[in-house]
Amino acid sequence: MSVLTTLAGGHYTLTTGGKTYRVKALIDQQIQADFARWHFERAVEDLRAARALYTDAEFDREREKLRSGFRTGLYDFKSARGAELLGTLPGMGFLCARLIEGVHENEVLELIATCQGDVSEILKAVIQDSFPETMKLAEQKKTAP
């Protein structure tokens, strides 16, 4: 069982298993830049893992597509691909590791599993606070005929 509260100082707290974690209330530029770099590096690793499936020319084209995508924001936090990745366990883990103070990256997936509802609530609140205009557009899109 976990407890989620909001502190007056603009942080959330998450208490679980006798431990209390302080959670940053906003996603800053550094977190966004780190996310884009991490997202891009995952794509590069995937391409490298599939290297044997490509000719040299095909591999070079795919590598250039990745670079071009990075330069044009394809891997950014607020991109469609970024949103898709945030909906996965690795994406949530990455974001939680940067937002939850005092949690080691190796512990973050266990923390998510233990208090999945509260973690989802925290992420939703932090994203809402960080990008209110984006959330409003998403809501309008949902209710549009």
Image: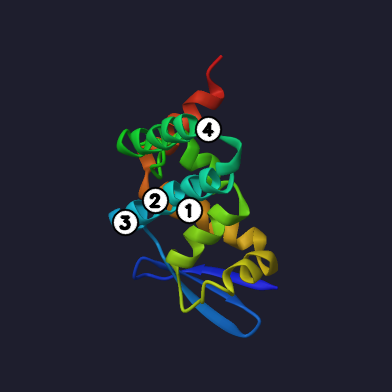
* Quarter of the rendering containing residue 2: bottom right
Vertical relation: 9 (above or below) 71 = below
How far apart, in angstroms, are the residues tagged by discs 3 and 1? 14 Å
4 or 2: tag closer to the N-terminus = 4
**CB contact under 8 Å: marks 4 and 2:** no
Which disc, if any, is residue 129? 2
- Relative image position of residue 63 (x, y in whole percent): 42, 37
| 75 sits to left or right of 1 | left
**CB contact under 8 Å: marks 2 and 1:** yes
SS of the residue under disc 4 = loop
Q: Nearer the viewer, mark 2 or mark 3?
A: 3
Quarter of the image with the N terminus in it: bottom right
**Residue at position x 54%, y 53% in the image:** 91
**CB contact under 8 Å: marks 4 and 3:** no
**Residue at position x 58%, y 83% in the image:** 19
Vertical relation: 23 (above or below) 21 = above
- Relative image position of residue 73 (x, y in whole percent): 34, 36
Which disc, if any, is residue 125? 1
Vertical relation: 8 (above or below) 142 = below
2 or 3: tag closer to the N-terminus = 3
Number of residues whose C-alpha sits closer than 10 Å to that of mark 2, classed few (under 14), some (14–19) or many (20 or more):
some
4 or 1: tag closer to the N-terminus = 4
**CB contact under 8 Å: marks 2 and 3:** no
Residue designated by label 4: 55
3 or 1: tag closer to the N-terminus = 3
How far apart, in angstroms, are the residues tagged by discs 2 and 1? 6 Å
Residue designated by label 3: 28
Residue type pointed to by label 3: Asp
* Quarter of the rendering containing residue 53: top right
Residue type pointed to by label 4: Thr
4 or 3: tag closer to the N-terminus = 3
Number of residues whose C-alpha sits closer than 10 Å to that of mark 4, classed few (under 14), some (14–19) or many (20 or more):
few
